Image: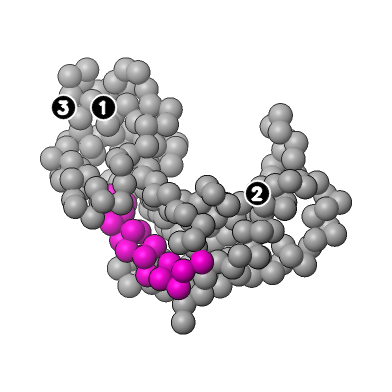
Amino acid sequence: MNPVIENSTLQFLRELSRNNNREWFLENKEKYISANENVIVFVEKLIEEIAKFDEDIGKLDAKKSLFRIYRDVRFSKDKTPYKSNFGAGLGIGKGNKVSGYYLHIEPGKSFLAGGAYQPKSPVLKEIRKEISMNGAEFLEILKKDDFRNNFRGLSVEDKLVKVPQGFEKYDPMAEYLKLKSFVVIHPVADAELHSEKAIHHFSKIYQSIKPLNDFLDAPFLG
């Protein structure tokens, strides 16, 4: 039987969102520990499934893949000390790879994602060069049935207005060269998290991201 995200885990996040302060968190530390363990067990099984088509993911430690729940408030106007979600980065930035998979668990706002999020300038330039030179291959990935069924296309967050310097204004791939991230997102309902089919279903969605990840990583793997 596959693990699921328990109702109590989402309930903890709801309560934390309403009581985002150190006193409440310390009083409810046991709830946090229980919820965190639930997510770790879920991610462990998810890693096993993803490793069936992306063997590098099998080397990951689920516990280390989870992002800290403590927010870095040093440069933020929002001084609430805790995140109201659990997030896990799977393979992102490991070795020479720039892509990976991401799991976001938050009541009413959960999602699966993958690709390369806001890569640094030199990396971004190499990805853009790869897209410009191999546009047909890139478009073929985006046109795959399983990809189109799972995603509405690449995120256009922070997209540039003009084609970046170093590329032709009328490059056939101009609209993609304006992107600053190469990410896809699949929303997940709370009920899906509680289903014993979630692990299998999520791994299939991640599998449809792998060709995109392989394309994004190609310039850096020699």
Q: Residue at x 39, y 49 (%)?
A: 186
Residue at x 18% of width, y 51% of height:
144
Q: Is residue 104 visible?
A: no
Any magenta on residue 186? no
Closest to the observer, 165 or 193 = 193
Q: Give the residue furthest to the bottom.
A: 1
- Residue 158, above or below 60: above
| C-alpha distance separating marks 3 and 2 | 41 Å
Q: Which labelled disc corresponds to residue 172?
A: 3
Mainly helix, strand or loop, the magenta region? Answer: helix
* Relative side of 101 to 71, left or right: left
- Residue type, numbered disc 2: Ser
- Residue 195 among magenta residues: yes
Label 1, secondary structure: give it. Answer: helix
* Position of residue 89 measured from the top left corner of the image (x, y, whole percent): 50, 55
Q: Which residues are magenta?
A: 194-213
Residue 114 position within the rendered picture, expressed as x and y whole percent measured from the top left? 39, 50
Near-viewer residue (5 or 67): 5
Residue position marked by numbered label 1 in the rendering: 175
Amino acid under disc 3 = Pro
User: Crowding at label 2, few (<14), some or many (≥20) Cα neighbours within 10 Å?
Assistant: many
Amino acid type, callout 1: Glu
Residue 84 is marked as: 2
Quadrant of the image occupied by residue 206: bottom left
